[in-house]
Image (spheres, helix red, strand yellow):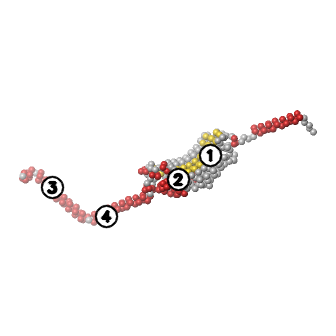
Amino acid sequence: MWIFSDNSKCIFFIWNQWCLYYAAVVCLLFSPVRTNNVCPTSCICAKDPGTVTCRDGEDTEVPGDIPEWTSTLILQGRNISTLRRGAFMSNGTELQMTTLSLSRNGIRAIEPYAFLGLPRLHLLDLSHNQLEYISGRAFHGLLQLRSLYLNHSISPAATEQLSNALDAQSLLNLHRLELAGNALKSIPPLRLDMHNLHALVLINNSITSVGGGDVTTLYQQKRVRVYLALNPFRCNCELGAFYYWLKNSSQCPDAGRLLCSEPEAKRGVPVENLREEDVDCMSENLEAVSYVFLGIVLALIGVVFLMVLYLNRGGIKRWLNNIRDACRDQMEVYHYRYEQDSDPRLANVAV
């Protein structure tokens, strides 16, 4: 049986304390570092506002070590050509990010479920990219997204794909959609029945006319505000339904900036300042019919005149001969008098 003195007990207690302290230090030094406290390479992190900024660089993928505390992520000037599935899933965990800016990265394709792991995202900016492919499930999981910016990003090949990607079931809370500067020739066939869509920005495109079907949809979705400035509208009778929509609705806040580009006579004229007859197909048709009718009447008059001449050709010929003989007799009288007046001998005899 071991018997320890007081001094031995004290030394043993101190030794145990030092061993525990040493073991704790070793664990801290050699334990794996938590990724949620590390800033990605070539990025600038500000933990207090929760912002991570990664500008320029040759990276072709989204950083895989995004801190969990990130609320705003800005990736710009990189070579991320494709957003792959779960590109923002940091170590398989969801991020509490609310703002994501991916402008000017040369993105060409968005694969299905690319934004998984961002359930709280409110703003997504994909402007100034070169999107050629957008999966129908590209925005799946963004149930809290309120603003989506796709300005100067959509190629003609991706226009139809976009309408499938903007599914009302995936974007229940989408409030603002911007599609400026994409050379769109008409209002894209989007699901405008999204529950909370309030602003649709289509400025600086190539829209020349808005069809009656689109106008009917806009009438039904009275909460939507559509911005259409800087589009080359063709102001003819095909614009009639849209013209009356501008006149009777307040859904186009920039209506005063909508200008005609065709025809030449109306270039620069605000669409809302057109006259009703300028966009009335019935008036144009009636005017065309009136000109045709006038031409027919004049043609009939000409035919009748020619028929009268033909039927009275004998009398007209005699009348012309009589006029010719009368003119000849008159000219002979004038000729005879002229000869008498011009001979001086005849003049003396007359005296």
Q: CA distance from mark 3 to mark 4?
A: 41 Å
User: Which label sits on residue 334?
Assistant: 3
Distance between mark 1 and mark 3 Cα atoms: 109 Å
Q: Are marks 3 and 4 in contact (CB under 8 Å)?
A: no
**Local secondary structure at mark 4:** helix
Residue 125: image x %, image y %? Answer: 59, 46
Residue closest to the far bottom: 311
Q: Nearer the viewer, residue 189 or 5?
A: 5
Residue 304: numbered disc? 4
Q: Which one is earlier in the sequence, the residue at label 2 or at label 1? A: 1
Residue 78 occupies quadrant = top right
Q: Which residue is mark 2?
A: 251
Note whether residue 170 is visible.
yes
Real-space Cα distance between discs 2 and 3? 88 Å
Looking at the rendered structure, which numbered label has been put on residue 170?
A: none
Q: Nearer the viewer, residue 45 or 317?
A: 45
Image coordinates for residue 87, horizontal then vertical, percent: 65, 47
At x 37%, y 61%, the residue is 293
Q: Which residue is mark 1?
A: 99
Say if residue 158 shows up in the picture: no
